[in-house]
């Protein structure tokens, strides 16, 4: 039995050595595939992420007026938004504010923000989202940034509404 195992091992080894020159000749004859070099210039893809936005404020409190003014300023200076009142597709940011306590108007303001999509001025707007809360003067800047970020998120989520 042991002689048979040694014999089969010897035959298998000789078979491998006999087949090896055939594989070596085949791999040497074939031309290796050379990949085309890729240009080192990345393609610039410009996605138009500019969203038309309109801010409409309702309220007489000073903190609410500052909130509306800063929100308009953020939209006006950002490259993601175009502050406009022109007729056309846009996101309307409807801001309503009131003093938390009329006897203490500068302490805090209650606000309500509603985001709506408007295809044109004469058409019905579609409700996208809404938010209510209180703002104090110390938190005004962070609230403006949060509202602008949320508006950008809605612009990205509902980008298909702006497609022509």
Image (cartoon, rainbow, N blue to C red):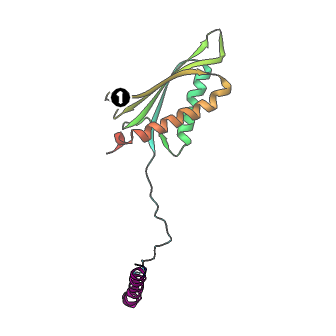
Q: Toward the viewer: 135 or 60?
A: 135
Choose between 17 and 60: the one closer to the eye: 17
Which residue occupies the foreground of this view, 114 or 129? 129
Residue that label 1 marks: 125
Q: Which residue does the image show at 37% across and 38% down from the upper left?
A: 89
Question: Is 65 displayed left or right of 23 in the figure?
Answer: right
Q: Quadrant of the C terminus?
A: top left
Q: Which residues are magenta?
A: 3-28
Q: Position of residue 10 (x, y in %)?
A: 42, 86
From the top left corner, tell me how far across and down residue 126 is, in percent.
35, 29
> Where, quadrant-wise, is the N terminus in this rendering?
bottom left
Specify the quadrant of the image occupied by residue 133: top right
Give the mark count. Answer: 1
- Magenta span includes 22: yes
Residue 107 vs residue 77, the one in the foreground: 107
State whether residue 149 appears in this view.
Answer: yes
Q: Residue at x 40, y 84 (%)?
A: 7
Is residue 60 covered in magenta? Answer: no
Q: Quadrant of residue 71?
A: top right
Q: Main secondary structure of the magenta part?
A: helix
Tell me the quarter of the picture where residue 19 sits: bottom left
Judge whether 6 appears above or below 51 on screen.
Answer: below
Q: Does the rendering let one see residue 83?
A: no
As displayed, is residue 120 above or below residue 105?
below
Q: Residues within 10 Å of mark 1 (few under 14, many from 20)?
A: some
Tag 1 secondary structure: loop
Locate residue 76, reporting x and y percent.
53, 40
Report whether 103 appears left or right of 147: right
Q: Whole-percent x and y of residue 28?
A: 40, 89
Residue drawn at x 66%, y 24% as measured from the top left:
137
């Amino acid at each position: 039995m042991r002689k048979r195992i040694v014999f089969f091992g010897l035959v298998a080894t000789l078979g491998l050595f006999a087949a090896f020159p055939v594989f070596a000749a085949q791999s040497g004859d074939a031309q290796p595939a050379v990949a085309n070099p890729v240009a080192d210039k990345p393609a610039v893809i410009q996605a138009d992420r500019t969203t038309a936005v309109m801010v409409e404020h309702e309220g007489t409190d000073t903190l609410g007026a500052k909130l509306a003014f800063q929100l308009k300023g953020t939209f006006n200076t950002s490259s993601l938004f175009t502050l406009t009142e022109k007729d056309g597709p846009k996101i309307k940011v409807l801001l309503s504010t009131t003093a938390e306590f009329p006897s203490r108007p500068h302490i805090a303001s209650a606000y309500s923000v509603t985001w709506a999509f408007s295809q044109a001025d004469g058409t019905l707007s579609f409700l996208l989202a809404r938010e209510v809360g209180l703002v104090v003067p110390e938190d005004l800047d962070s609230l403006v940034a949060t509202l602008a970020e949320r508006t950008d998120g809605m612009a990205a989520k509902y980008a298909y509404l702006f497609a022509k």
